[in-house]
Amino acid sequence: MQTPLATPVPVLRLPRGPDSLNRGFAPDGHRAPLKPEVPEVLEPPESRESQEQQARASLRERYLRSLLAMVGRQVCFTLHEGVQVIAHFGATDLDVANFYVSQLQTPIGVQAEALLRCNDIISYTFRP
């Protein structure tokens, strides 16, 4: 199952909300419908679930391959409040909840080693 990735994984960035503190949600709680009001084509539920499962599996595989490609490379992380830090990626834990990095360059200095919580990371970029 080691096939090369033909296209990069796209990243969806939601626009800032009206109060500039959140992303993509109206302060009054009204949201757009998740699915358009279009009559669905009659498909067996099994085939739809199977297609969704295959899509999820493909996306997870791409994400895990991107993690493998980051090992030992310099990665730029964008955190909440627009803070950008640069570090050498080392590893992730089993649940992909934390990233272990070294030579973390922050606005207030350099840390030799650190753990970045994935919940604090908005995006990351690196050169393959």
Image (cartoon, grey):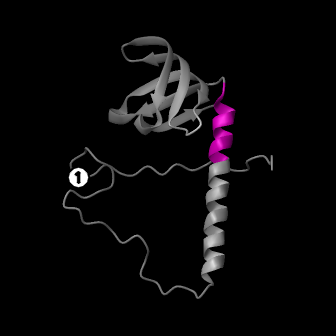
30 w.r.t. 15: above or below: below
SS assignment at label 1:
loop
Q: Position of residue 75 (x, y in %)?
A: 56, 27
- Looking at the image, which residue is at 36% across and 72% down? 33
Residue 128 in view of the camera = no
Q: Position of residue 40 (x, y in %)?
A: 52, 85
- Location of mark 1 (residue): 18
Q: Quadrant of the C terminus?
A: top right
Kind of residue indicated by mark 1: Pro
Most frequent secondary structure within the magenta stretch: helix
In the drawing, does residue 117 fall left or right of residue 128?
left
In the drawing, does residue 4 fall left or right of residue 88?
right
- Looking at the image, which residue is at 47% across and 36% down? 118
Residue furthest toward the front? 94
57 w.r.t. 51: above or below: above
Task: Decide which of 19, 3 is in the foreground and name it.
Answer: 3
Residue 45 in view of the camera = yes
Q: Which residues lie in the magenta part? A: 62-71
- Looking at the image, which residue is at 65% across and 70% down? 51
How many discs mark residues in the rendered view?
1
- Looking at the image, which residue is at 66% across and 27% down? 71
Q: Position of residue 10 (x, y in %)?
A: 57, 50
Magenta-drawn stretch contains 66: yes
In the drawing, does residue 40 fall left or right of residue 119?
right
Magenta-drawn stretch contains 47: no
In the drawing, does residue 2 fall left or right of residue 67?
right
Q: Quadrant of residue 83?
A: top left
